[in-house]
Image (tube, rainbow, N blue to C red):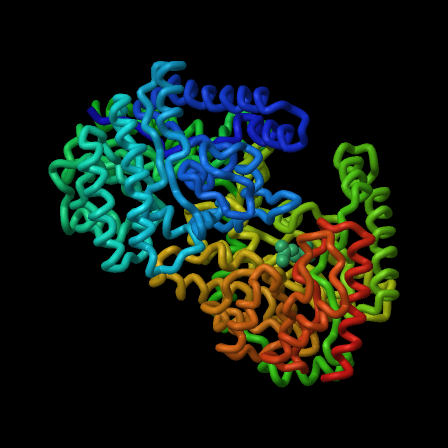
């Protein structure tokens, strides 16, 4: 029989109960026993919901107390040496210590989970002596069975992916590490088999990235061992986020099922199946419902896809499932009360996707007629949004088509622009500036709340913002910075602020998704054509400029960052969405320039986040991402200085693209790169203005003058002092006022010392 399944369900609870429990526990407000019982309630509620909706193969062990990669490390006792631990189940204090740091030991690194906005904790293998400390999948399996009579499908992060995501070992030790880990995995699986588990889902998303011959050999050996050690267990080898590489090797592994993503890897996976077929002895996990998008699936198209798949795999060997874990989408559309009906009708979050899966499974077993009514309703809902006026702005579509055909280029090349800009701005060598935001104090947040609740009038709030600007313009002048900023006090979030002012965006009330740990984000939805309506930042910037004779830098979020931190429509390409955003933001750039602002920063911290997983697709993405930035910034006068900012990321492979953005000045975060960033500049040349952050803004610590002169000297060993800027790593909104002022004073002092030398 065809079955329905998902690969994982959001952990955070219908009303973020999970986050609240975690934070209460961390703050010492609830005991561990209370915390455990709240966690169990959330977990069981999820399972009950899946059961009631009619999902047949229900995942267990997808739940986590923080992150599933950290769980895997903890299950094997892989705890960095700086934490107090000597074997056995990892106590919660140590578990959260690794995730968040303690007073004695730094947290483990956190990084993006493939190309999503979920972040996992990077396991540190050095010095670890792995052993099974507890069989968490087994505990989850038992709990579901005993409490709810559910025959669960334990979800486990597979050994190859786990190892590839870990650090603290040399590549040459990969096999040695697998020799230690695979027997531990085998023990987990044996115990599950003994308990009577039928299915287990082993996630190996690494299989969608390019694998070496050695990796393929490793796969055969790993899954060969599992088959021998737990022969009765049906293993679903699960991949997602892209089409698999090395298809023929993967489908020949001795596992019962192969899970493929037919949404994000649709074209590739379909081609592979059509060209090579699907093995007769295996089950296909058909990921047809998008696990990370928020849109209703076209049931008609998905039913047709499932029918197509049946020419390669008989229906009784198909499991209809989500393309990946539903971790990446909000819980339910049903609680939203403020969305446009055409939009709301076209959305499907986690719970609505469960319904889709159940319906599609029904279509496979009983034919599409069995869901005829739902098919029609679904078509209508999708069409209603398609026809909405928000999606059909001819003015925007035509303008964007026209500008995206043009060559987005400043009228002079950088060297010549640089000369006229120097002449106009007369900045000293090694100019000092900041990244944009200043501390968002309790006061600032309170003022915003009062205004949002209607207790303060718009004018009252604007007056308060002006006072903040006054204070900080005064401080910046007194500290002696060269290029000032207004401080971004009116902004909560760098995407939401613009989204609320541009056409084409919508905001949910409860659409939270986990970003990392207890941190959840509520991404805006770009559902219509994006359009500039009226100036968004001119008032505050112009006000700040009126208070000083030094240049004030305008501050915008770039098109790619806005796009990558939003959920986006799928009826047009991401490239087109980026150009629409670029066109809208260009109008803001022009408005700022017209208002007398001669330096404009367009932040693009999230460019790397959109990088496709497959290397062969990356150049194309980078090309249009760069073009979007250039479209945003290319129409200004030669004397207008365009800045950009990126938070730390690996730059070595991106320097060409960053140069191609052609910003007059880029500021980049350096402290978390441990010198690697400067190393990248040794090997590559970068010939535009650049500021490598000279101090870490993530901690309240005030860096000393000498420390910063050290940073400056190090950078100037490889970079041209004539093009170098002095700035902190990133925005200062999370810092306190006192430490900010003290740090910036030291930064200016360090600059004075450096200026003597260069
Ligand atoms: N201008 C923004 C700020 O200073 C940049 C933030 C970021 O890079 N994430 O807050
Ligand atoms: Zn930053």
* Foreground of the two, 403 or 172: 172
Task: Give the number of callouts.
Answer: 0
Q: Would residue 32 be seen by someone viewing this image from the given angle? A: yes
Most extreme residue toward the left is 280
**Considering only vertical position in the picture, is 102 above or below 550?**
above
Please provide percent x and percent y for residue 664: 63, 74
> Quadrant location of the C terminus?
bottom right
* Foreground of the two, 654 or 125: 125
Identify the residue at image location x=61%, y=71%.
Answer: 635
Left or right of 339? Residue 404 is left
> Quadrant location of the N terminus?
top left
* Ligand 1 in which quarter: bottom right
**Considering only vertical position in the picture, is 411 above or below 611?**
below
Please provide percent x and percent y for residue 256: 20, 35
**Considering only vertical position in the picture, is 610 above or below 92?**
below
Which quarter of the picture shows residue 212?
bottom left
Which quarter of the picture shows residue 237?
top left
* Foreground of the two, 175 or 557: 175
Please provide percent x and percent y for residue 194: 25, 24
Identify the residue at image location x=25%, y=58%.
Answer: 214
Identify the residue at image location x=34%, y=46%.
Answer: 205
Please provide percent x and percent y for residue 524: 57, 43
Identify the residue at image location x=31%, y=20%.
Answer: 151
Q: Would residue 539 be seen by someone viewing this image from the given angle? A: no
Left or right of 128? Residue 516 is right
* Foreground of the two, 599 or 514: 514
Left or right of 305? Residue 60 is right
């Amino acid at each position: 029989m065809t079955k329905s399944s998902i690969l994982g369900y959001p952990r955070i609870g219908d009303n973020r109960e999970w986050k609240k429990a975690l934070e209460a526990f961390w703050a010492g407000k609830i005991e561990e026993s209370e915390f455990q019982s709240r966690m169990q309630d959330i977990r069981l509620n999820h399972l009950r919901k899946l059961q009631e909706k009619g999902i047949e193969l229900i995942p267990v062990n997808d739940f986590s107390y923080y992150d599933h990669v950290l769980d895997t490390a903890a299950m094997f006792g892989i705890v960095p040496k700086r934490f107090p631990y000597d074997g056995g189940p990892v106590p919660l204090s140590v578990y959260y210590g690794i995730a968040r740091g303690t007073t004695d030991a730094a947290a483990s690194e956190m990084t993006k989970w493939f190309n999503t906005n979920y972040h996992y904790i990077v396991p540190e293998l050095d010095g670890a002596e792995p052993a099974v400390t507890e069989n968490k999948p087994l505990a989850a399996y038992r709990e579901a069975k005993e409490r709810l009579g559910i025959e669960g499908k334990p979800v486990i992060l597979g050994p190859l992916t786990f190892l590839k995501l870990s650090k603290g070992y040399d590549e040459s030790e990969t096999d040695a590490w697998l020799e230690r880990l695979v027997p531990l995995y085998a023990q987990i699986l044996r115990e599950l088999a003994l308990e009577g588990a039928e299915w287990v889902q082993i996630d190996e998303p690494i299989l969608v990235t390019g694998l070496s011959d050695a990796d393929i050999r490793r796969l055969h050996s790993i899954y060969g061992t599992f088959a021998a050690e737990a022969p009765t267990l049906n293993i679903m080898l699960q991949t997602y986020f892209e089409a698999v590489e090395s298809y023929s090797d993967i489908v020949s592994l001795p596992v019962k099922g192969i899970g493929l993503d037919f949404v994000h890897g649709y074209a590739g996976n379909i081609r592979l199946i059509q060209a090579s077929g699907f093995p007769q002895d295996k089950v296909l996990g058909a990921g047809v419902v998008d696990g990370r998008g928020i849109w209703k699936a076209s049931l008609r198209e998905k039913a047709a896809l499932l029918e197509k798949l049946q020419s390669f795999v008989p229906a009784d060997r198909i499991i209809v499932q989500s393309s990946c874990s539903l971790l990446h989408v909000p819980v339910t559309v049903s609680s939203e009360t403020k969305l446009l009906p055409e939009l709301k009708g076209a959305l499907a979050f986690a719970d609505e996707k469960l319904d889709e899966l159940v319906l599609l499974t029904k279509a496979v077993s009983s034919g599409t007629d069995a869901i005829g009514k739902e098919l029609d309703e679904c078509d209508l809902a999708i069409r209603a949004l398609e026809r909405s006026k928000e999606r059909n702005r001819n003015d925007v579509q035509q303008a964007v088509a026209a500008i995206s055909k043009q060559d987005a280029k400043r009228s002079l090349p950088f060297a010549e622009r640089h000369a006229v800009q120097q002449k106009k701005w007369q900045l000293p060598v090694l100019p000092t500036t900041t990244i944009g935001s200043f501390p968002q104090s309790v006061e600032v947040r309170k003022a915003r709340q009062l205004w949002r609740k209607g207790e303060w009038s718009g004018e009252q709030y604007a007056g308060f913002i002006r006072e903040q600007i006054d204070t900080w313009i005064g401080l910046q002048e007194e500290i002696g910075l060269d290029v000032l900023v207004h401080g971004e006090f009116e902004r909560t979030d760098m995407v939401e602020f613009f989204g609320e002012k541009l056409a084409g965006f919508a905001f949910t009330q409860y659409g939270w998704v986990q970003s990392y740990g207890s941190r959840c984000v509520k991404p805006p939805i770009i559902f219509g054509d994006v359009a500039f309506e009226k100036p968004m930042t001119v008032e505050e910037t112009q006000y700040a400029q009126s208070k000083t004779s030094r240049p004030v830098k305008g501050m915008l979020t770039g098109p790619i960052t806005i796009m990558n931190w939003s959920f986006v429509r799928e009826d047009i390409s991401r490239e087109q969405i980026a150009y629409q955003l670029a066109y809208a933001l260009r109008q803001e750039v022009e408005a700022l320039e017209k208002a007398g602002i001669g330096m404009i920063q367009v932040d693009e911290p999230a460019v790397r986040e959109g990088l496709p997983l497959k290397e062969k697709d990356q150049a194309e993405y980078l090309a249009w991402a760069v073009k979007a930035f250039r479209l945003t910034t290319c129409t200004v006068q030669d004397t207008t200085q365009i800045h950009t900012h990126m938070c730390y990321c690996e730059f070595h492979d991106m320097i060409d693209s960053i140069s191609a953005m052609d910003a007059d000045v880029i500021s980049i975060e350096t402290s978390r790169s441990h010198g690697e960033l400067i190393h990248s500049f040794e090997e590559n040349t970068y010939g535009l203005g650049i500021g490598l952050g000279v101090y870490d803004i993530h901690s309240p610590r005030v860096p000393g003058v000498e420390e910063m002169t050290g940073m400056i000297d190090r950078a100037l060993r490889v970079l041209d002092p004539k093009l170098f800027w002095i700035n902190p790593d990133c925005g200062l909104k999370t810092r306190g006022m006192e430490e900010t002022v003290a740090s910036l004073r030291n930064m200016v002092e360090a600059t004075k010392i450096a200026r003597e030398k260069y």
